[in-house]
Amino acid sequence: MAWNSQGGGQGPWGGGGGNGGDGGPKGPTPPDIEEILRRIQDKLKSFLPGGAGGMRGLILIVIAVVVLWGASGFYRVDPGQQGVELLFGKFVKHTTPGLNYWFPAPIGEVLKPNVERTNTITIGFRGLGEGSRRSGARDVPLESLMLTGDQNIIDIDFVVQWRIKDAAAFLFNIRDPEATIKIAAESAMREIIGQMGLEDATTGKRQQVQQKSRALLQKILDDYGAGVSIAEVQLQKADPPDEVIDAFHDVQRAR
């Protein structure tokens, strides 16, 4: 046929017409790994200054990153705060207000709790904002009803004001500081009320109740290592329960 004489024994598509050794179909050629690596290196060099001096540029970039990372260790403690420096999650030291330096993350960490703010906890009632004012407050009998030393029931609402005195102890020695303070305050008040008669607790010795409960609460928290200073305990209400308060007042007026 005509294509045999003109194509030197090849088929019309350039392949051999016979079934000899090299004439069969070939599979896909495997990728050249060295060529791929060379292309990757060339691509990286194109992003670095100096082209062929890409290693030098890479070193400069690494140095710049290290410098920026190191500079991130500077931090400022604002007035009223206390810095707490941690190394691998463990407390190392306190720092004072101003500019300070510590190991950058993830090696170091700095916490900055406010140690001058006065915090307030209410026991026996709940009001808007948990503040010290009782207007519109909701009574919490489980907290407010206590037993006096002469076996009478008294309804007490009070406020505890506290501040952080040791930031590290406050952050790490107790799991839930506010809940701990609240439980300890209620316990201290119950113990003091249990040493007094109903009349003393409701009338003439309210100041004594406040002072003694504050001192006992401070001792309990110091034993826990809570890092908290109790500024004040304020009685908001100390009366017999509503069910018997009228009878109590009648007895008081009759004396």
Image (cartoon, rainbow, N blue to C red):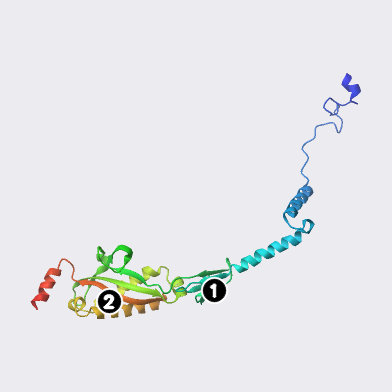
- Asked whether the beta carbons under mark 1 and mark 2 sit within 8 Å of each other, the answer is no
Q: Is residue 32 above or below residue 204?
A: above
> What is the residue that sits farthest to the top in this orientation?
1
**Quadrant for the C terminus in the image:** bottom left
Specify whether 232 is left or right of 35. left
Across and down, in percent, residue 60 comes to: 71, 63
Regarding residue 64, the answer to whether it shows in the image is yes
- Find disc 2 in the rendering and name its residue: 191
Badge number at residue 234: none
Q: Which amino acid does label 2 sit on?
A: Glu
Mark 2 residue crowding within 10 angstroms, few (<14) / some (14–19) / many (20+): some
> What is the residue that sits farthest to the left in this orientation?
254
Across and down, in percent, residue 66 comes to: 65, 66
Q: Is residue 120 above or below residue 195?
A: above
- Of residues 130 and 12, the one nearer the viewer is 130
Badge number at residue 99: 1
Look at 15% across and 69% down and name the residue there: 245
Look at 31% across and 78% down and name the residue there: 214
**Quadrant for the N terminus in the image:** top right
Q: Is mark 1 on a helix, strand or loop?
A: strand
Q: Total label count?
A: 2
Regarding residue 90, the answer to whether it shows in the image is no
- Of residues 17 and 188, the one nearer the viewer is 188
- Name the image quarter holding residue 173: bottom left
Q: Is residue 128 above or below residue 10?
A: below
Across and down, in percent, residue 124 comes to: 27, 67
Across and down, in percent, residue 239 comes to: 19, 71
Q: Which amino acid does label 1 sit on?
A: Leu
Q: Is mark 2 on a helix, strand or loop?
A: helix
